[in-house]
Image (tube, grey):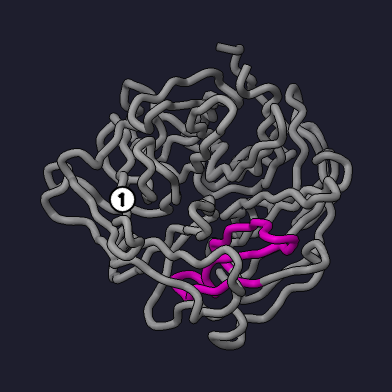
């Protein structure tokens, strides 16, 4: 395993949407900075690449100083070294940034627990469609919805994406399901989308200690089944994910609690898993909790280490190297990482909670004040 990297910020002056800076020793370019004092925290990092080599990144803002309904989109034309704001979109939140058939899309909600919407950009993220109705991107408006920047699966001519319904009144009251569409259809037309049934947490799962399932990854299992692999909110220090599978006709989501909980280091935090055909492995960038509990913290609160891991079967995971680490588990986090393959490398957008240039700490490890860009070279090596 490569030696861990401890990073520190060296530039003195930054503000929201400021010019990018770097973090020492990596280096790690900063895409955006929202000072901790603003109480507007950076959430939901997304990343995409355009055919011309431009990288796009997105994030929303949460916290008591925010409106909880705005997403910012940035672009880099120099391989991720510097970034510039392209759009600030009101009415878009918790969104996946992705490309499909030559266009750029944002798919998420209108706000915290809002309607499910999708927008399209045909000019590289400068301008975006408006989800005014069901024919133009308003996909689900019958309930309160939750999601995150999670991967889309392309399989047998369809695109699949995880989503959750929020039933309230407390956090964790989520019902997981998958949405899908013919990959040649108009993604903005709600009539073309199909949804599976919805599955919520049962009181008898994990001895009654499962507190929520959320932020599901649409994947193909080793057996060729379409699946939703979800983060599991659970107080135990042996972190887990939940694997739900879809029936052959694509209409029914199923879960067997006796076999569906998978050991996953970092499974209590949001993760992105992708399949790599060259190595024939699933890959993930994860925030594993340590084997020994940290006093005063739950495993889902520990985000101060980011590792590269792979699995042949989604059940046994091997940690290859530590990418980022810091000794302060309470105030530092390298988390909610969205990433994609770029040849032999991985490109990632990292929601980062880290001390301000004057030394003021982030509010906590969850409430990030930076969005950073990370390239993992030769990840298969």
Where the C terminus falls, by quadrant? top right
Q: At x 65% / y 56%, what residue is drawn? A: 98
Magenta span dominant secondary structure: strand
User: Which residue position is annotated with label 1?
Assistant: 245
Foreground residue among 246 and 360: 246
The reply, left or right, for residue 239 in relation to residue 378 is: left
Query: How far from the left and from the top, in percent, is residue 153?
Result: 51, 51
Which residue in the rendered view is the most extreme toward the right? 78
Where the N terminus falls, by quadrant? top right
Query: How far from the left and from the top, in percent, is residue 316?
Result: 35, 25
Q: Tell me the quarter of the picture where residue 358 sits.
A: top right
Q: At x 60% / y 67%, what residue is drawn? A: 184
Report if residue 104 lies within the magenta region: yes
The reply, left or right, for residue 62 in relation to residue 227 is: right
Q: At x 69% / y 42%, what residue is drawn? A: 372
- How many labels, in total? 1
Task: Magenta stretch: give its range.
Answer: 93-119
Q: Tell me the quarter of the picture where residue 142 sits.
A: bottom left
Q: At x 47% / y 73%, what residue is drawn? A: 193
Report if residue 178 lies within the magenta region: no
- Placement of 36 over or under 121, stated as above or below: above
Query: How far from the left and from the top, in percent, is residue 158?
Result: 50, 60
């Amino acid at each position: 395993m490569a030696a861990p990297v401890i990073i520190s910020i060296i530039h003195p002056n930054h503000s929201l949407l400021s010019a990018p800076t770097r973090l020492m020793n990596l280096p790690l370019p900063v895409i955006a900075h929202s000072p901790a004092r603003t109480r507007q925290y950076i959430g939901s990092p997304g990343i995409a690449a355009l055919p011309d080599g431009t990288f796009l990144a997105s994030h929303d803002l949460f916290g008591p100083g925010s409106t909880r309904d705005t997403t910012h989109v940035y672009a880099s034309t120099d391989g991720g070294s510097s970034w510039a704001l392209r759009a600030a979109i009101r009415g878009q939140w918790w969104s996946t940034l992705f490309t499909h058939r030559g266009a750029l899309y944002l798919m998420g909600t209108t706000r915290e627990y809002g309607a499910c919407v999708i927008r399209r950009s045909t000019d590289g993220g400068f301008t975006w469609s408006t989800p005014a109705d069901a024919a133009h991107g308003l996909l689900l408006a019958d309930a309160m919805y939750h999601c995150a920047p999670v991967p889309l699966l392309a399989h047998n001519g369809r695109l699949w994406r995880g989503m959750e319904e929020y039933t309230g009144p407390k956090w964790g009251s989520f019902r997981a399901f998958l949405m899908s569409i013919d990959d040649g259809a108009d993604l903005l037309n709600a009539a073309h989308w199909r949804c599976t049934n919805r599955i919520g947490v049962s009181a008898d799962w994990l001895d009654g200690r499962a507190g929520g399932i959320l932020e599901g990854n649409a994947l193909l299992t080793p057996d060729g089944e379409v699946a939703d692999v979800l983060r599991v909110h659970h107080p135990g220090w042996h972190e887990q994910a939940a694997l739900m599978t879809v029936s052959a006709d694509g209409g029914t989501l199923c879960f067997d609690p006796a076999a569906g909980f998978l050991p996953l280091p970092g499974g209590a935090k949001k993760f992105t898993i992708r399949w790599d055909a060259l190595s024939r492995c699933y890959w993930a960038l994860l925030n594993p909790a340590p084997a020994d509990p940290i006093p005063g913290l739950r495993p889902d609160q520990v985000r101060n280490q980011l590792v590269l891991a792979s699995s042949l079967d989604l059940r046994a995971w091997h940690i290859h190297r530590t990418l980022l680490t810091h000794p302060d588990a309470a105030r530092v986090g390298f988390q909610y990482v969205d990433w994609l393959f770029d040849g032999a490398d991985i490109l990632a957008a990292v929601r980062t909670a880290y001390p301000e240039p004057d030394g003021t700490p982030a509010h906590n490890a969850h409430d990030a004040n930076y969005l950073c860009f990370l390239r993992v070279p030769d990840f298969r090596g």
